[in-house]
Amino acid sequence: MSDESAHSYWKGNLKIVLSLLGVWFFISFVCGILLVDVLDSIRIGGFKLGFWIAQQGSIYVFVVLVFVYIKLMDRLDAQYKDSSTNSDNAARGEME
Amino acid sequence: MSVQIWTFTFIILSFGLYIGIAIWSRASSTNEFYVAGGGVPPLANGMATAADWMSAASFISMAGLISFLGRDGTFYLMGWTGGYVLLALLLAPYLRKFGKFTVPDFIGDRYYSRSARLIAVFCAIVISFVYVCGQMQGAGIVFSRFLEVDLTVGVVIGMTIVFFYAVLGGMKGITYTQVAQYCVLIFAFMVPAIFISLMMTDNPIPQLGFGSQLTDEFGGGYLLDRLDNLSRDLGFAVYTEGQKSTQDVFFITAALMFGTAGLPHVIIRFFTVPNVRDARRSAGFALVFIAILYTTAPAVAAFARTNLIDTVNNIEYSEVPEWFTTWESTNLIAFTDKNNDGRIQYVGDPERNELQVNRDIMVLANPEIADLPSWVVALVAAGGLAAALSTAAGLLLVISTAVSHDLLKRSLMPDISEKQELLYARIAIFVAVLIAGYYGINPPAYVAQVVAFAFGLAAASFFPAIVLGIFQKRMNKEGAIAGMVCGFLFTAGYIIFFKFIDPAADNAEGWLFGISPEGIGTLGTLINLVVSLSVARFTAEPPREVQQIVETIRLPGEAMEH
């Protein structure tokens, strides 16, 4: 793999990781801890929303995040495998 | 059949299974012994990771802790699952690509330094020992309560079983035993939960039952509302409201997450899959398998708490159910009739409260409290043992590889043959089992507390060093070593100060920024990061070959060979 496409692969990878970590931080620390009392004013069935996110919802989101990561990385890997002969394509594909 | 016969049956069957697997999966090379030959399918590795991860603390203690902490118990739930997101995104694929055997291996090679490797060996051994003692103790409690054997006999039986399959099979034996242990433990956890959920709310899914209406027999209304009202009436903290300060919950959650991602016995599991893609997949599967238990635990906590209050508060002591008397004999539940009215007053005010309930009882006795069939009660014993033994085996392997591979082969005796290395690995496991067993029988009083601190230490030492090693090409040995040492010493010092030197100051006013010792690992992590980055800025760049390695682990494609 050329230096250029290695570089853009790594950038694509970082973009995926950082955006998923953004969601990770938002759901657990922001919704589950910092805003939990505010969200508690909303009720869904027998649950207060903040309490539900803290003890249930955040865990479901974590699971989804890891599977989204698997999917996106597979796609990124495939992109660079197919276009390893043409690094320009790869770089462009990454910008989309 | 009585509970005891059922218990014997389940334990003998499950132990027979573990031994059978051990014989079938003997290890013949260091590669098999350390990383199961790198050929574990991702689904199996996910299950093994889940069993490795979910210890006696997750199985026996966590739901009980939550039922007494209410909403504050959240930090265990989010901390011990959210860490897997970090593990999957920041560590597992790159470490697999790096293709070595152990965490100190990575630290030693990435930071081209024997001192860094030895510091990592030291941290890995301290963290794993602290943790393994708790497991042996957990196994001992299950044996002594359910089989009514002496605690010592219980620990010795547990040690023998672990010893047998860990020494024979190494990582290969441990992996496939853990797959079986995951199945046993999750079945044992879910069956009583489903039963209780059905009984109390008519909903077979505990995660939903937890937010449903109670059946008429239990007084109707939403479960959580009822629990809040009961707590308020009896003077306990309201269940769905937080008591701890927001910043403390924030820091504890973060410390548990970073610690989870930095625990060597979890990281080492990702060295066992065939390639990088499978490392990502197995992290995903592991989190699913863990989430099944972790989303059920808060439901169990709420059910058990409601049921306990309903069952025991204000009833005549002479009319308590049978389980109450059995557990009284183990001192996990204790009644003192302060006002001599012959009734149990279970209230929040410590002056008037007459009932002391050990939190472990919430899972162990839950099936009995809910009056479930005796085979369900017996399942819990087999599940608790599976949880304790699987985690103990994973930890013992870390200790053994740290000694035979990192300390002997890579540092002190580089000339030993593979056969000798394998022999040393087996001897190291043997010695580690003996030491762990000793502490299981004679537990230092603070084991339970110290286990929680293992996370703070892992967070402040390994996590930043590994993440920077992957994401900062410029990170050098000076930075990493300074960071690990500062993070570890700061965190250990803070904990030792509040737990052993000045326990009187261990309260929100005494703490630094209102952060409890449980949450200080987060600050330790930050200190590690800041120190590493600043020291690295003023010292020489890492050698060209090392930067090359970092570039290679960032590329797509196959892992380097073991």
Image (spheres, rainbow, N blue to C red):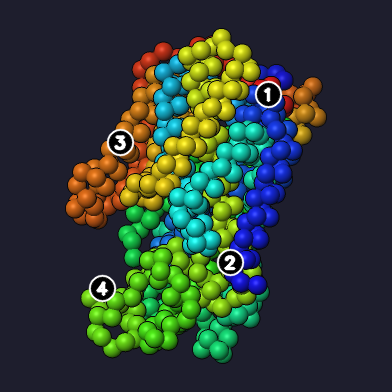
Q: Which residue is mark 4?
A: B350
The label number, if any, that marks residue B353 in the structure image: none
Q: Residue at x 49, y 50 (%)?
A: B153
- Is label 2 or label 4 in front? 2
Q: Which residue is mark 2?
A: B4
Q: Which residue is mark 3?
A: B490
Q: Which residue is mark 1?
A: B29
**Amino acid type, callout 1:** Ser
**Amino acid type, callout 2:** Gln
Q: CA distance from mark 2 to mark 4?
A: 36 Å
Chain of the residue displaying label 3: B
Q: CA distance from mark 1 to mark 3?
A: 40 Å
- B385 or B314: nearer the eye? B385
Q: Looking at the image, is B172 positioned above or below residue B161?
A: above
Q: Position of residue B154 (x, y in %)?
A: 50, 52
Q: CA distance from mark 4 to mark 3?
A: 35 Å
Q: Residues within 10 Å of mark 3 (few under 14, many from 20)?
A: many
Q: CA distance from mark 2 to mark 3?
A: 48 Å
Of the numbered discs 4 and 1, the one sitting upstream in the chain is 1
Q: CA distance from mark 4 to mark 1?
A: 59 Å
Of the numbered discs 2 and 4, the one sitting upstream in the chain is 2
- Is label 4 or label 3 in front? 4
Q: Residues within 10 Å of mark 2 (few under 14, many from 20)?
A: some
Q: Position of residue B389 (x, y in %)?
A: 56, 47
Q: Secondary structure at mark 1?
A: loop
Q: CA distance from mark 2 to mark 1?
A: 41 Å
Q: Are discs 2 and 1 both within one chain?
A: yes
Chain of the residue displaying label 2: B
Label 2 with label 3: CB-CB less than 8 Å: no
User: Does B275 sit left or right of B309 as displayed?
Assistant: right
- B344 or A39: nearer the eye? B344
